[in-house]
Structure formats: structure tokens, C-alpha cells
Amino acid sequence: MLPAEVLIGDPSTEWMRLAVPLMLQEDLATSRQVVPSFAKDGSAAYEEHATELARTTIEERNGKIRLQATITDSQTQRNRRAISLEADSATGILAAANQLAKQIDSRAQSFPTKSVSALKAFTVAAGTQNLSERLQSLNEAVSADENFGLAHLALVETAAQAAPQTLPSVIAAGAARHNQFAPLQRARWEALVARYSHAPLQQQSDTAAAILRIAPNNVDALAALGVNRFLEGDGREGERLLRQAMALSPANVNLPLQLANGLIESKRFSDAITVLKPLSGNASVILALATALLLDGKAKEAETVFQNLIGLLPAGAPAANFLRVQWEAISTKNTRPASSAAAPSVAGYSAFLNGHFEESARFWQSAVQQTGDTDLRARAMLAASLDGEGKSGEAAKIRVMPFVPDLGDKDIAIAFNQMRQRLKL
């Protein structure tokens, strides 16, 4: 979906250039057939593999706003349909955009605010890269309409980056109003809160599934639920959901990476390699590919791939040396810290290495709970600690899975290789 063109440069209509496609994108989120995606121009739409383009035009004459949309086939460049609507003034643009969305697809929802002031502030926020300015505009949008769920969602995500110290109060303010949000925004709010609060994995899955009942093509919810299904041990469903998300958003490199991580968790290493190899020029993919190769028994090839990551850093750089030491500890099944001169930085590792297994189990049990059972490192260490205590029955109940190591954790080799020992990899 392309931005609107403002034919008459009246200041009262300039902000609508971005507002109209933003409204259409949100309104059409509940469609079963249309997967709306904002594109700044035709090239961006082509990269998104869009099959149709909706070009919108806003014209103001004699106090009237005329909104027109042309639906174009992206392959043939032929116009398939033209839709024209009128509004009494700028205040009527919300109703006009909602009508336009419903003419495109009858399942479209209405934009989740009736306040033009809230819409304008939200549009300003969407149009700036400056996080402080975006935060200010989103606060203005929420002040203009306290029940504007979409603005509350964006405010939480922005606050998490720009002012994390305000996050508890921002979430509390949204929580006080979320029962008044429109259905889709209410479902998204519950999923967001579950994620930020590290709710139990089942709860996070349930909130993602609730979004999909309203908006079955929501890529973020499909990906979140797919990742969770893998973590729950349902690899078949996890793969189905993530492949569906990939089909809807083929330009998103994070989706195949999430799929590959899930395949690694399911011990389907060769399948993960197949997914990752075409993307191996992307730095974010290299470690996952090297890990899949290593766990698949292809140590030499894994080493070669990992060196590609080292090659992206200046020769002799401290970061390169650190990563090299980390990889050596992982690939040689070294269960001691990467730096033998330093004690482990995490108390749970230290307790485990010193044989204080009860203390270690308490630490890693807390880590599992605090992360909603999503921390596979903590799962591996909890199982190993329980075994150390002689509680093999309890240890066997912990679902330990292979995982891509976080090399930022300097002692990750301890957890990674405990996982390998338990799974005989």
C-alpha cells in the first residue's frame, strides 16, 4: 500500500498523506484475503512481493475532502478498480477511510479512534525516526483519546526503547483502559503485556492465538505462536505457523531465522541448514548456521562458517578474540568457563561448577520461571543441576532442547555443553 498523494497543498490536508495508508493498513488487518503492508514507493512494494498496490489521492475543494483509491495489479500495472469517496471536511477523513477499507474488503474493521486529534498525533509519531519526538506525539495521541489502543501499543514499544524507566507506568496506564480498546487492539495488548511480563509460555501462546482469531494474517502473531509451539515441543505446528508467516512476508529475514532456530530446537539440524544456507550472507544468520552444522556433526564446515563471522570484524579486535574463544569452548565441548582465569559471572554457573547443586537448581528454576519457560539455557542448567542433586526423575521432566548459543554470555559454553551431554549431541 503506497502513501497518499495530496493534490492541493493545503496545510490541513498535508498530514493526511501518511494518515490514510496508516488507517487502511489497520482497518484491513482483520481481512482474510488482504494482507496490508505499508510501502513508501513502488520499489518497496515490489520488494514486499505485493500483488496489488492501493494508491490513494486526497483532494480538497470548497471545504470538501475527496478521497480516491486506485487498485493496481503489481505485475501488469493495470488498474483493477477505482474507488472515490467524499467527506465534509478534514474531520470526516476517518469515516471516509473506514468506508474505503470496507469497499476493499467487507471484513475490514473501523480505525480504533474517532478523534481526529488523536489520529493526527499518531500520524506524526509514525512519521518520525526521533524516538523522543515519537514518544511525545504518542502521549498526545493517548491524551486525546484514552481508549485509542493502537496508540497505547505503540507507546509501550517506544517507551521500551526511549525511556525504559517509564515502562511500568505506561503499561499501567494502558492496562487501566484496555477493556475499552477495540477487539483487535485489546487482543494485541494482552499479548504485549504477556511478553513484557514474561508470562508462562502457555499464556503467551494463548494471547497470540487470540489475535489470530481476529486477524488470521497477522504476521507478528503467527511468528510468536510458531516460536512458542517449537518451545512447547510441537515442532510440526511451529513450522506450519512460521512458514505461513514467511509466505505473507517473504522479505522478512527474521522469519526464516526463527524457523531455523525452531528446527534446531527440534533436532532437525539438516532442515535448519537448508533454511539458513541461502541467507548465509546475513551476519545475523551465521551463528545459527554454524550451530546447526556443529550439532549435525559437521564440525569442519561449522568452523568455516563461523570464521565468516570473525571475518566481519577487524583482525585482532578484542571482540573477534572473545568470539573465537567462545566458539572454541562450545565446539570442543568445554564445560568450564571460556576464561579459566575468571570466575563465572552468573551465580547459577558458579554454584553448579562448585558442586552446590541445590543452590544452582534454585537459581535456574527462578530463571526458567522469570522468562516464561523460554530460556533454553536455563532449562539445560536446571536439568543438569537436578541431576547433580540426585533428582534424576525431576530432571527428566525438564524439556531440554538444542539452542543457538548467545555468545554475549561469556560462560554460555557451560550451558551449551551441558545441553549437548544430556541430548548426546
Image (cartoon, rainbow, N blue to C red):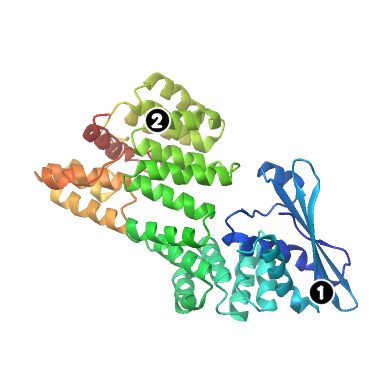
Residue 312's place in the image compared with 43, above or below, is above
Question: Which quadrant is the C terminus positioned in?
Answer: top left
Under mark 2, the amino acid is Ala
Left or right: residue 404 versus residue 314 is: left
Which residue: 31% across, 53% down? 373
Q: Can residue 337 be spotted in the picture?
A: no
Report the front residue among 256 and 351. Answer: 256
The kind of residue tagged 1 is Ser
Vertical placement of residue 347 versus 420, above or below: below
Give neighbour class at mark 1: few <14, some 14-19, many 20+ (Cα, 10 Å): few
- Circle 2 residues within 10 Å: few <14, some 14–19, many ≥20: many
Name the image quarter holding residue 383.
top left
Q: Is residue 138 left or right of residue 326?
A: right
Label 2 to label 1, Cα distance in Å? 55 Å
Q: Position of residue 73 (x, y in %)?
A: 75, 46
**At which x and y percent is residue 183?**
51, 70
What secondary structure is found at the residue carrying circle 1? helix
The label on residue 12 is 1
- Residue 153 tag number: none
Quadrant for residue 28, please give it: bottom right
- The circle drawn on residue 292 is 2
Q: Residue at x 50, y 78 (%)?
A: 180
Q: Relative to 213, say whether 302 is above or below.
A: above
Q: Secondary structure beneath disc 2? A: helix
The one of 370 and 329 positioned closer to us in this rendering: 370
| Mark 2 or 1, nearer chain start | 1
Query: In this picture, is 141 found above or below 239?
Result: below
Quarter of the figure with the N terminus: bottom right
Could you tell me residue 36's position as x and y percent? 64, 55
Residue 272 appears anywhere in the view: yes
